[in-house]
C-alpha cells in the first residue's frame, strides 16, 4: 500500500517540475565541472609559475657564479703567461681569490662543468709548480751576478785606491820604496780579481739569458695549454646556461688560434737564441717585450702593438 501511495504521489507531480529539476541539475553539474577544471588550470598555472621563478633564480645564481668563474680562469691564464716577467706582487694579485670563485662551481654546476673546471684547476696547479722549479736557476744566477757585481765593485775600489797611491808616490819621487812594491802588488791583485769577476759575470749572464728564454717559453706554453682547457670549460658553461653555440666551429676556431700563437712563441724563442748567439745586448725579457710589440731588437721606432687572439 505504501508503495502504491508513493507511486500515485509521483504521478500527480507535473512533468514540467521534472524538466525544471533535471535542467537545474545538469546546469549545476556543468558549473561544478567548469569550476573544477578552472581550479585545476589555475593550480597548474601557479605550479608552472613557481617552477619558472625557481628556474630563473637558479639560472641567475648560475650566471653570477659562472661570470666570476670565467674571470678567474682568465686571470689564471694571464698569471701563467706572465710568470716569467713582471713583479711577483702584481702577478699574485691576478690569482687572488680565484680558488673561491672556482669552488662555487661545485655548488651550482653540472657534473660536466665541474669536471672541466677541475681539469683546468689541476693543470694550473701543476704548471705553477713546474714553472717555480724552472725559475729556481734564474734566481740563483741573478744572485750570483749580484755577488760578482759587488766583488767587482770592491776590486775596482782597491785598484783605484792603489793607482792613487802610486800616482802620489810617483809625484813625490818615492817610486822605489817598499810601499811602492806593496801598492803595485795590490794593483795587480785587484786587476786579476776584476778580470775573474768580469769573466764569471759574462758566463753567468749568458746562462741567465738561456734560462730566462727557457722560462719565458715554458710560461707561454703553459698559458696556451691552459687556454685549451678554458675553452672546454667555456663550452660546458654555455651548454649549462643554454646559450646557443656551434661547439665544433668554436673548437676549430680556438685550435687555429692556439696553433698560430704557438708559432709566434717558437719564433720568439728562436729569435732570442739567435740574438744571444750574435751577442745582442738585450735580455730575453727585453727581447720578448720588443717582439710582442712587433719591433725587431735592432729597431727603436715607435712600437706597433700586435694583437694575438687567445
Image (cartoon, rainbow, N blue to C red):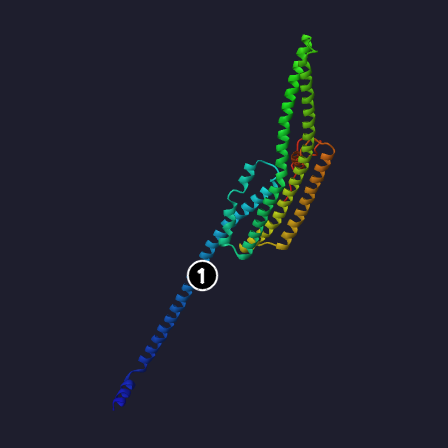
- Left or right of 75 in this view: 208: right
Q: Residue at x 63, y 23 (%)?
A: 154
Q: Residue at x 47, y 54 (%)?
A: 58
Measured along the vertical axis of the image, is residue 285 above or below residue 185? Answer: below
Of 285 and 132, nearer the camera is 132
State the quadrant of the C terminus. top right
Residue 103 position in % (x across, y down): 50, 50
**The furthest residue to the bottom:** 1
- Left or right of 81 in this view: 4: left
**The furthest residue to the right:** 278
**The furthest residue to the top:** 172
Of 192 and 149, nearer the camera is 192
- Left or right of 89 in this view: 260: right
Give residue 161's quadrant in the image: top right
Measured along the vertical axis of the image, is residue 294 above or below residue 258? Answer: above
Q: Secondary structure at mark 1?
A: helix
Give residue 273's quadrant in the image: top right
**Residue 67 in view in this figure:** no
Q: How many marks?
A: 1
Residue 283 position in % (x across, y down): 67, 33
Crowdedness near tag 1: few (<14), some (14–19) or many (≥20) residues, C-alpha within 10 Å: few
State the quadrant of the N terminus. bottom left
Of 18 and 82, nearer the camera is 82
Q: Which residue is mark 1?
A: 48
Of 235 and 49, nearer the camera is 235
Give residue 95's quadrant in the image: top right
Q: Residue at x 60, y 52 (%)?
A: 232
Q: Residue at x 45, y 59 (%)?
A: 51
Measured along the vertical axis of the image, is residue 95 above or below residue 152? Answer: below
Residue 99 position in % (x across, y down): 51, 47
Residue 160 position in % (x across, y down): 65, 18
**The furthest residue to the front:** 178
Amino acid at each position: 500500500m505504501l508503495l502504491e501511495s508513493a507511486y500515485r504521489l509521483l504521478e500527480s507531480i507535473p512533468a514540467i517540475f521534472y524538466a525544471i529539476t533535471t535542467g537545474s541539475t545538469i546546469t549545476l553539474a556543468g558549473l561544478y565541472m567548469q569550476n573544477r577544471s578552472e581550479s585545476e588550470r589555475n593550480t597548474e598555472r601557479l605550479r608552472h609559475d613557481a617552477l619558472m621563478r625557481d628556474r630563473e633564480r637558479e639560472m641567475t645564481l648560475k650566471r653570477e657564479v659562472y661570470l666570476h668563474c670565467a674571470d678567474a680562469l682568465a686571470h689564471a691564464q694571464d698569471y701563467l703567461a706572465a710568470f716569467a716577467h713582471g713583479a711577483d706582487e702584481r702577478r699574485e694579485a691576478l690569482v687572488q681569490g680565484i680558488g673561491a670563485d672556482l669552488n662555487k662551481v661545485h655548488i651550482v654546476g653540472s657534473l660536466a662543468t665541474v669536471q672541466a673546471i677541475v681539469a683546468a684547476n689541476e693543470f694550473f696547479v701543476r704548471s705553477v709548480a713546474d714553472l717555480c722549479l724552472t725559475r729556481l736557476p734564474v734566481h740563483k744566477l741573478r744572485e750570483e751576478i749580484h755577488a760578482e757585481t759587488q766583488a767587482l765593485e770592491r776590486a775596482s775600489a782597491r785598484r783605484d785606491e792603489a793607482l792613487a797611491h802610486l800616482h802620489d808616490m810617483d809625484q813625490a819621487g818615492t817610486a822605489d820604496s817598499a810601499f811602492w812594491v806593496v801598492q803595485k802588488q795590490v794593483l795587480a791583485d785587484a786587476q786579476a780579481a776584476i778580470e775573474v769577476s768580469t769573466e764569471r759575470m759574462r758566463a753567468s749572464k749568458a746562462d741567465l739569458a738561456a734560462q730566462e728564454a727557457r722560462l719565458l717559453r715554458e710560461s707561454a706554453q703553459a698559458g696556451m695549454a691552459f687556454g685549451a682547457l678554458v675553452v672546454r670549460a667555456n663550452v660546458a658553461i654555455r651548454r649549462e646556461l643554454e646559450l646557443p653555440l656551434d661547439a665544433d666551429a668554436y673548437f676549430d676556431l680556438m685550435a687555429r688560434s692556439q696553433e698560430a700563437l704557438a708559432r709566434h712563441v717558437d719564433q720568439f724563442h728562436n729569435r732570442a737564441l739567435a740574438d744571444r748567439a750574435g751577442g745582442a745586448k738585450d735580455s730575453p725579457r727585453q727581447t720578448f717585450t720588443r717582439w710582442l710589440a712587433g719591433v725587431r731588437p735592432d729597431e727603436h721606432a715607435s712600437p706597433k702593438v700586435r694583437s694575438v687572439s687567445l
